[in-house]
Image: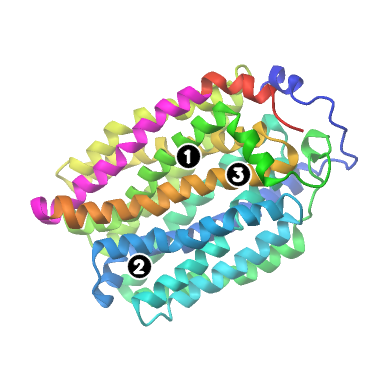
Amino acid sequence: MSDAVNSNAVAAAPAATSSPPTRAYSGYVLALLTLVFIVSNIDRQILAILIEPIKAEFGVSDTAMGLLTGLAFMVFYTLAGIPIARLADRASRKSIIAVALAIWSLATAASGFARSFGQLALARVFVGFGEAGCTPPAHSLISDYFPPQRRATALSIHAGGAYIGAALAFLAGGWLVAHYDWRVAFYLVGFPGVALALVVWVTVREPPRGLSEQRSAAGTSVPFREVLRFLLTQPAYIAMTIGAALQSLAGYGVMTWGPSFLSRVHGMGWTDIGLGLGWTIGLAGCLGAFTGGRLADRLGARDARWYMRLPALQAVCGLPFLVGFMLLPTTAAALICFVPYYLLSAMYLGPLFATVQGLVGLRMRATAAAILMFIMNLVGLGLGPLAIGVLNDFLFGPIFGQDAIRYSMLAVGVCGAFAGIFFWRASRRLGTDLAQRRA
């Protein structure tokens, strides 16, 4: 964050005794954790392009598929996320990531063996349980490998893994569905994660907490109720969490139902859908995430409020392109609008995650990230796909038929623009709250 803010923030904390890692090794850890995040998002998002064939085989409704893509995953993801993060604030973070990766990879592969809708939903529950151990420990590790002035950039690179993973899920999933079936897709994306878990376990070193800032964590842990009480006294954290939840609601809703939208409304084949969405999500998403992080680090060096001003501006600027994607009549025009929409929607992640890590003490970082992710995913991944499915079945479906998905997705997607109000409110308190952070 800005030098002025950093100098006021718990300057009396004792210095860490270990030497900082080399830039090369820090870069390796970031690349490896980003690869883990890519795998996480492949396993999570592969289901989006498999909605139509799974729905046809098991004979279920859009509401049921909304439950499968959202709440079935979220059940254990939300229940396990905060306890695992609490463990990560006390124990080895790299070990937690390695074990979690093995669990969700095996559960993804097991999804291909499901012989009923209930069995598939159960497998997705365990995917959620495993993925709960991915992001909060990774954010805490990255914050110890990268100092505050480079942290938003590093976390934006890590966040870009979500878009690469979703792109690969669409590209590979579309091709596999066209040439094989949906079960093969689960096998091929699930099993390689077990080998990657071993690489994380063996090659990542667990750094002392506070290493990048050359300060040490006081004590052994902070009780959860104290972390929660502290966060509830931070207006910036509360406002940015509400904004992130609204942005996540729109993002997960649009991403999950995007393939079905292009199939039903524009009549695209699965290979073309995978190519059309995959490349856009991968390239525009990564460019947006990286650009957001770099801009936040540059502008935030002069004024920390830019860490939240940027997300506020992008949330509003993306709305016209979302409307174009949903309502323009031709496939080419819709896909052209999707590019700037997705680029803008990705820009908030790096500044958001870096700000959370800067607001709290060293032994609160994984827990604060987990609480944020809990709310983002409960609202976004849990309710976004479900809301679109319900709107398809019960509100817009009887009126518009196959075109119902246009208006269901637009109704949910517009929520992302309202996130800008809360990000702007967070920016107004950010300097004060950063200066009052805990050791």
Callout 2: few (<14), some (14-19), or many (20+) C-alpha neighbours within 10 Å?
many
Give the residue pinned by disc 1: 287
Q: Does residue 269 appear to the left or right of 28 in the view shown?
A: left
Disc on the earlier residue, 3 or 2:
2
Assign a secondary structure to mark 1: helix
Give the residue pinned by disc 3: 369
Mark 3 to mark 2 CA distance (whole Å): 35 Å
Residue 145 appears in the figure: no
Residue 252 vertical placement versus 415 (above, below): below
Callout 1: few (<14), some (14-19), or many (20+) C-alpha neighbours within 10 Å?
many
Residue 262 vertical placement versus 354 (above, below): below
Magenta stretch? 398-426
Q: Position of residue 105 (x, y in %)?
A: 55, 69
Residue 202 appears in the figure: yes
Which of the 4 image quarters holds residue 365?
A: top right
Specify the amino acid type for callout 1.
Answer: Leu
Q: Is residue 403 magenta?
A: yes
Q: Is residue 170 magenta?
A: no
Which of the 4 image quarters holds residue 235?
A: top right
Q: Quadrant of the C terminus?
A: top right
Q: Position of residue 238 (x, y in %)?
A: 52, 32
The answer to the question of whether label 2 and label 1 lie on touching residues, with beta carbons closer than 8 A, is: no
Specify the amino acid type for callout 2.
Answer: Trp
Give the residue pinned by disc 2: 175
Residue 278 vertical placement versus 271 (above, below): above
